[in-house]
Image (cartoon, rainbow, N blue to C red):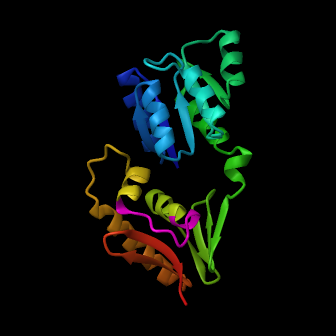
Amino acid sequence: MKLLLVEDELSLSRAITAILQKNGYTVDAVYNGREALEYMRADEYDGVILDLMMPEIDGITVLRTVRQSGDKTPILILTAKSEVDDKVLGLDSGANDYLTKPFAVQELLARIRAMTRNPWTQADAKLHFGNLTLDCATFELSSPSGSFRLANKEFQMMELLMRNPKTLISTNRFMERIWGYDSEVETSVVWVYISYLRKKLASLESRVQIKATRNAGYSLEEIP
């Protein structure tokens, strides 16, 4: 699951990022409202953690801009503003939840889990293609022949493929979507994970394959 963290306090941003990554999330961290809008326009996120008091563009403006564009990505406000009027303003501007600083780590994680269980994120909790099913709640990839619980990045790659069947997905898109724009990981890691998934598809006797198109990317195709 991929989250966008919008927090201008660098030390807090690093601490939250480390906590989220330790709990299996992929995180993009940005430090002002302008970057938040740019990242949300360029990529898809399962949820956003947004500070209100942001430089360049404040959090309320970010919220309103996102919702006016029709984007329903779940957004959790994380801020030092604790007055009731501030909470009401944030929620009325389109936030799904509101958590004040300082906060308990377990409460933050629980609120993220609850937020990302919203109906629009659960409508397609199980993805189907060919004789494959991917359960987005349990990370389970299954066919009539059996099942595997995928590791976090395996799941994210398979989810992207199954949400876009028969569509070429470039190595760069995998890198940006799963490892993040600023990752120092070599792009060859994509091929490594594709290899892992192909072995699982073979073990499941799947009628689906991950096809490589030279210099273009990968696509999920049904085997004739």
Q: Is residue 22 above or below residue 156?
A: above
Q: Is residue 13 above or below residue 177?
A: above
Residue shown at the point (36%, 69%) measured from the top left: 216
Which of the 4 image quadrants contains residue 80?
top right
Q: Is residue 216 above or below residue 14?
A: below
Q: Which one is in front, 32 or 131?
A: 32
Q: Which one is in front, 183 or 55?
A: 55
Furthest-front residue in view? Answer: 69
Q: Which one is in front, 150 or 185?
A: 185
Q: Does the magenta-highlighted stretch encompass residue 7?
A: no
Instruction: Estimate the x, y position of residue 89 in percent, counting from the top left.
Output: 68, 17
Q: Does the magenta-highlighted stretch encompass residue 169?
A: yes
Which of the 4 image quadrants contains residue 135?
bottom right
Residue numbers of the magenta segment: 161-171
Figure quadrant of the C terminus: bottom right
Which of the 4 image quadrants contains residue 136?
bottom right
Q: Count the marks: how many?
A: 0
Q: Give the dominant element type of the magenta stretch: helix, strand or loop.
A: loop
Instruction: Estimate the x, y position of residue 74 in percent, counting from the top left.
Output: 63, 38
Q: Is residue 188 above or below residue 175?
A: below
Q: Is residue 24 left or right of residue 113?
A: left
